[in-house]
Image (cartoon, grey):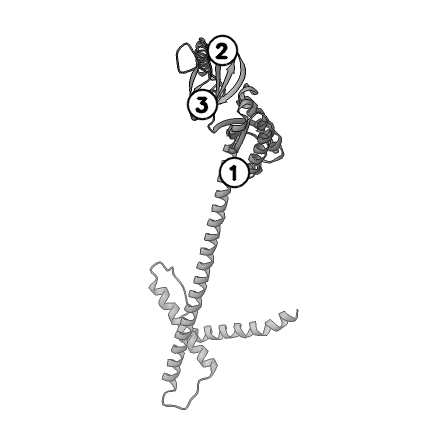
Amino acid sequence: SRFGSCTLAALREFAGCFFAAGTVTRTQFQQLSAMAQKQESGCLPCTNCFVTVPQDKYYAVENFGKYSHMLKPGLSFAGFDCCGCCIQYRSITSRVDQLMVQVHTKTKDNVFVTASVAVQQSVKPDNTVDAIYKLSDVHAQIDSYVSDVVRSCVPHLTLDESFEKKDDISNSVQQRLTVEMGHYGFQIHKALVTEMVPNHEVVASMNEINKQKRLRDAAIMAAEADKIRTVKAAEAMADAAQLQGEGIARQRRAIIDGLRDSITHGTQEVLSSDKISELLLITQYFETLRDIAANSKASVVFLPHSAGAVSDVASQIRNGIMQAGAGAPGQQRM
C-alpha cells in the first residue's frame, strides 16, 4: 500500500515536470496512466486480505510476488496477509481506451505531413494475465507499430491520394495492430486516420492555387458574358438598321407613289423608271437641304441651287450608276 502510494506520487511529480517542460501533454499522460497496470491495496488497513474490485477493472492476485489468480468484480477474500507482505494486487482497466498517435512522414511528391491516428483498444477478457505482465508500455508499443505502417504506406502516395485513401491506411494499421497486439492480450477495435495535416506553407500554396483557379474561372465567365452582350448588341443594331432601312424604303416608295399619282392624275400618261428616279433624287436633294438647314452646327456649304442643277445632279448619279454597271463585268473577267 505504501509502495503503491509512493509510486503514484512519484509518477505525478514526474508528469508535473514534463507538463512544465512541454514534453508530454496532460491528455497523453492520462492515456498512459489509464493503460498501465497499477499496484493496488486491500480495503482494510495494514492487510490485503479483502479487496473491492471495481466493475471496470481486472485484478490479479500475487502471492509473494508470484501470480496466483484473477478476481471477479465485488468484494473478494484473497487470503491471509500481514501488512501487505504476503498478498499484492495488480489491476488494469477493462474499458476501451483511445490512443492518439502523431506520425510525421513524407508523401510521394515530397510533401511532409502529420498523420493523426486514433487507436481504440481494450484488454481481452481471456488474456488479462498477458496484458498485465507482458508489456511495460502499451502506448509506446502501439506508437511504434502505427508509425511503421503509416511510414510504409504514405511515401507511396501523393498528397491528394493520401487524403483519398485514408481508409486504406486505417485498414492497414488495424490489421497490423490486431495481429501484433493480440500476442500481448489486447484487442484493437478500430484504427482511424482522423486527419492529414501538411506543412502550413503547403496549405497556403494549395489555397492560393485554388484561389487562382477560381479567379480564372470567374474571368472566363465574365469574358463570356461580355462576348454575349457584344454579340447581342451587334445583332440588335443589325436588326435596328434593317428595320430602319425597310422603313426608309417604304417611306420613299410611298413618296414616289404619291408623286406619280399627283402628276399622272386625270391623264393617261405613264411615268418611266427614269422619271421616277429623278423624282426620288429630287426628293432626297430637298431632304438634304432641309437637314443642313436644321443643323445649328452646320458649316457653310456651296451648292448649285437651281432647276438645272437638280437635273445635272440626277444625270451625274445616273451616269455613275451606269458606268459602274458597265465596268463590273470587265472587272470580273479580269
Question: Which residue is disc 3 drawn over?
Answer: 27
Tell me whether circle 2 and circle 1 mark residues in contact (CB < 8 Å).
no
Query: Can you tell which mark lies on residue 86?
Result: 2
Q: Residue drawn at (63%, 70%), measured in percent from left and top?
A: 332
| Residue 173 point in image, percent of width and height | 57, 32
The residue indicated by pointer 1 is 209
* Distance in Å between CA atoms under marks 2 and 1: 70 Å
Of marks 3 and 2, which one's residue comes earlier in the chain?
3
> Is residue 329 at all visible to an observer of this figure?
yes
- Residue drawn at 55 percent across, 36 percent down: 166
Of discs 1 and 3, which sits in the foreground? 3
307 displayed left or right of 142: left
* Neighbour tally class for label 2: few under 14, some 14-19, many 20 plus, Cα within 10 Å: some
**Left or right, 298 with reference to 318:** left
Q: Return the x and y of residue 4 as percentages of the image width and height.
A: 45, 12
Residue pushed farthest right? 334
Mark 2 or mark 1, earlier in chain = 2
